Amino acid sequence: MTTIKLGGKERELKFSFASLRALENYYKKPIGKIFSEDVANESLETLVVMLWACLYKSDKKLTVEKVEELIDESLENEELTFEDLKIAMQEAFNNSVLTKTKKEADEKN
């Protein structure tokens, strides 16, 4: 389980099935294209949207804009560093449904 302190609160980061569907709805394209095109560009917008998706299952009321505000607040209050955020996001991705499914498929082949 991956957690970060964001907005004064410990939050679990998880790419669940619901998170992946939220990403598809946000970007209006299949999840494979999102990870091959959008994630590859490493923009700040992509980081915020991915974080929002990781938090989606635990708090469906969060918006991308609110997550951006929480990141700013957490960085300013030194609850979190930008590097901590990037590492946590990578860890959440490595533990995701998508990654585990791909690993299992690769191991069978």
Image (cartoon, rainbow, N blue to C red):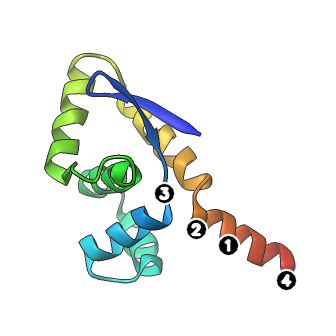
Query: Amino acid under label 2?
Result: Leu
Q: What residue is shown with label 4?
A: 109
Identify whether 38 is placed above or below 83: below
Q: Residues within 10 Å of mark 1 (few under 14, many from 20)?
A: few
Q: Earlier in the sequence, mark 4 or mark 3?
A: 3
In which image quadrant can residue 93 be found?
A: bottom right
Residue 102 got which mark? 1
User: Mark 2 or 4, which is nearer the eye?
Assistant: 2
Q: Are marks 3 and 2 in contact (CB under 8 Å)?
A: yes
CA–CA distance between discs 2 and 4?
A: 17 Å
Query: Amino acid under label 3?
Result: Phe
x, y (%) of residue 13? 46, 44
Q: Earlier in the sequence, mark 2 or mark 4?
A: 2
Q: Are marks 1 and 4 in contact (CB under 8 Å)?
A: no
Residue 98 got which mark? 2
- The secondary structure type at the circle numbered 3 is loop
